[in-house]
Image (cartoon, helix red, strand yellow):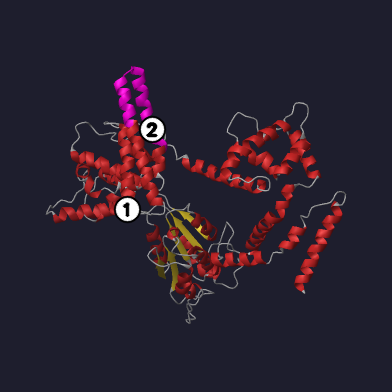
């Protein structure tokens, strides 16, 4: 696909007579291509070979280059904005300038364009839209959020790792061309140890050939037995292919797989493997270990209870205490790293403490974690806590006209009593005392959302009654009665309504932009601030003035008239 697209690129996009003017449709045509897949399977090599096959000069950028908005515009602005011209009439092609050597841009590792490449992705998308030169983008992480914004503008080509049998056949052919006999099962063993990384397999073949020649051995044949004996010299680091959940299992199971008479070298290798597992994702590994480490002790403790072995039971409790003490020390060290001190030199200590906790729960022979390791539940609990803190602050803001207390007193004293009293009135056996509920809500500055949504969030009894359990008829009757009058909570609308309108105006401003991806963040935020300053706060507040009895329409009309008068004064 890439080779065919490059061959017809100039005729498709640089031809003024071309009928296709829209290049963002899912069916194409596309001005750029996106090659994605795991490292070491030939994405960059493919792009270079295809560009050379079409006789193009290649301009390559990777993670070592500065790829910010300014850097891309300076380095590629002239390249993407012009095309090669030819003055040879015999070889000149329509719209393509066929006599000169054409060009091609390769943007490698585009998923690595981070904070240092400010607005680089937006500038790249903008260049793709207006480019007169084909662009090939290469990435490893296809699911990255930055790549998702790039995909609609590129031909999406995904690479997959080939199976080990396919790699083994190719390795045998390479060995034959280099005068080295490679057994099929030996080549499969190398492919498996390298994680089906083609580049690493070729490097292993080269290292094997050089090692034998340097050692003075005439034969450079690769047999299965020789590969198993020397696998440690050519094996790729296995920890790079371990997922976060597999690494969690390795840590919490402790010395699992080690025999009692294992030598010091084997034990040290096991310790290093568990320590390296922590760095698979050190930002989440501690939380995952904390979520799963006590589950390793559950079958051990249950077995001691069944056997009525008091000594073994006390031994399990002692090891549990040591493991929890280790995780407590880990929390202190983690706080020093993540807090204001930023002591990142404590990161190896955090890895050692998690390994220590796994050693204690696993015991001398290691433990077993049944089932799949669970993801850290702390993240979800912390998100719920943040949401409830926000709701409590909102309730405090609504009720500060009636009470003068902090959020702690409001949560422990006022909210439970007020909720219980309102709930008893709404669930009265004879009939719902709606008017009393509305009167009490007005007294404390609560609105309908506070009653039916926010207050229920602070109920500690999961089986208790909630306002959400009311039937639809009772809710509809309450809503009709509530909408008949004007309430104290609406006095806050004038203040909060400005903020809500500002957000809406800011979102409308963003919607008017033709391309969201190509907008600079700083410029967009500055424009939003200017729009907010232009909002007429007095006009908005006039719309929420208190209505008089029997004169709701007149008051609303007066509010609109006042708003119009205010705007007329500003124009003058």
Q: Which residue is drawn at 79% across and 70% down?
A: 568
Decide which of 215, 364 is in the foreground and name it: 364
Predominant secondary structure, magenta span: helix
Q: Residues within 10 Å of mark 1 (few under 14, many from 20)?
A: few
In the rendered image, residue 255, in percent from the top left (x then y), is placed at 28, 35
Q: Residue at x 37, y 54 (%)?
A: 41
Say whether residue 117 is visible.
yes
In the rendered image, residue 499, in percent from the top left (x then y), is placed at 66, 57
In the rendered image, residue 518, in percent from the top left (x then y), is placed at 55, 65
Q: In this view, does 467 lie to the left or right of 346?
A: right
What segment carries the magenta color?
291-319
Task: Name which quarter of the figure residue 328 lies in.
Answer: top left
Relative to 567, say whether 291 is above or below.
above
Q: Magenta segment: does it hold 376?
A: no
Q: Magenta segment: does it hold 307?
A: yes
Decide which of 443, 222 is in the foreground and name it: 443
Look at the numbered disc 1 and give the secondary structure of its residue.
Answer: helix
In the rendered image, residue 60, in percent from the top left (x then y), is placed at 40, 67
Relative to 200, say whether 472 is above or below.
above
Look at the numbered disc 2 and give the secondary structure of its residue.
Answer: helix
Label located before the other in sequence (2 or 1)? 2
Residue furthest right in the image = 550
Q: In this view, does 86 lie to the left or right of 409?
A: left
Q: Mark 2 points at which residue?
A: 294
Per the rendering, the mark at residue 345 is 1
Q: Which residue is drawn at 76% across and 32% down?
A: 432
């Amino acid at each position: 696909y890439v080779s065919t697209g490059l061959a017809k690129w100039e005729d498709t996009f640089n031809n003024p007579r071309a009928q296709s003017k829209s290049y963002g449709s899912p069916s194409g045509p596309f001005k750029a291509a996106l090659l994605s897949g795991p490292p070491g399977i030939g994405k960059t090599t493919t792009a270079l070979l295809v560009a050379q096959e079409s006789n193009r000069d290649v301009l390559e950028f990777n993670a070592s280059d500065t790829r910010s908005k300014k850097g891309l515009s300076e380095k590629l602005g002239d390249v993407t904005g012009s095309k090669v011209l030819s003055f040879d009439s015999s070889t000149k092609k329509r719209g393509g300038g066929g006599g000169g050597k054409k060009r091609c841009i390769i943007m490698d590792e585009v998923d690595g364009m981070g904070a240092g490449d400010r607005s680089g992705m937006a500038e790249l998308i903008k260049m793709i839209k207006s480019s007169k030169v084909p662009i090939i983008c290469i990435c490893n992480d296809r699911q990255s959020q930055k790549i998702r914004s790039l995909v609609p503008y590129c031909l999406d080509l995904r690479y997959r790792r080939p199976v080990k049998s396919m790699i083994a056949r190719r390795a045998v052919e390479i060995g034959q061309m280099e005068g080295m006999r490679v057994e099929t099962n030996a080549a499969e063993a190398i492919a498996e140890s390298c994680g089906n990384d083609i580049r690493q397999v070729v490097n292993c073949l080269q290292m094997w050939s050089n090692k034998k020649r340097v050692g003075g051995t005439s034969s450079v044949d690769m047999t299965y037995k020789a590969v198993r004996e020397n696998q440690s010299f050519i094996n790729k680091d296995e920890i790079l292919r371990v997922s976060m959940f597999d690494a969690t299992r390795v840590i919490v199971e402790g010395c699992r797989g080690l025999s009692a008479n294992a030598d010091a070298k084997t034990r040290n290798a096991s310790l290093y493997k568990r320590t390296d597992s922590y760095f698979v994702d050190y930002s989440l590994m501690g939380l995952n270990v904390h979520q799963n480490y006590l589950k390793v002790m559950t079958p051990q403790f249950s077995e001691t209870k069944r056997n009525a072995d008091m000594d073994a039971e006390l031994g399990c409790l002692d090891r549990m205490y040591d493991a929890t003490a280790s995780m407590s020390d880990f929390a202190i060290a983690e706080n020093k790293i993540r807090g204001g001190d930023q002591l990142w030199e404590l990161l190896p200590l955090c890895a050692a403490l998690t390994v220590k906790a796994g050693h204690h729960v696993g015991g001398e022979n290691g433990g077993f974690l049944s089932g799949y390791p669970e993801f850290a539940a702390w993240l979800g609990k912390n998100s719920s806590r943040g949401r409830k803190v926000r709701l409590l602050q909102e309730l405090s803001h609504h009720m500060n006209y009636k009470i003068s207390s902090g959020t702690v007193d409001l949560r422990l004293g006022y909210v439970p009593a007020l909720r219980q009293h309102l709930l008893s009135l709404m669930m009265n056996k004879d009939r719902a005392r709606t008017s009393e509920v509305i009167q009490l809500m007005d007294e404390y500055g609560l609105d309908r959302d506070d009653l039916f949504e926010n207050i229920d969030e602070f109920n500690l009894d999961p089986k208790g009654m909630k306002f959400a359990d009311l039937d639809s008829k009772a809710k509809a009757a309450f809503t009709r009665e509530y909408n008949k009058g004007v309430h104290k909570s609406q006095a806050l609308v004038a203040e909060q309504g400005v903020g809500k309108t500002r957000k809406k105006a800011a979102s409308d401003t963003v919607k008017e932009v033709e391309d969201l991806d190509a907008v600079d963040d700083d410029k967009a935020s500055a424009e939003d601030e200017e729009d907010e300053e232009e909002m007429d706060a007095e006009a908005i507040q006039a719309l929420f003035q208190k209505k008089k009895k029997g004169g709701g329409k007149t008051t609303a009309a007066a509010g609109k008239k006042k708003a119009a008068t205010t705007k007329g004064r500003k124009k003058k």
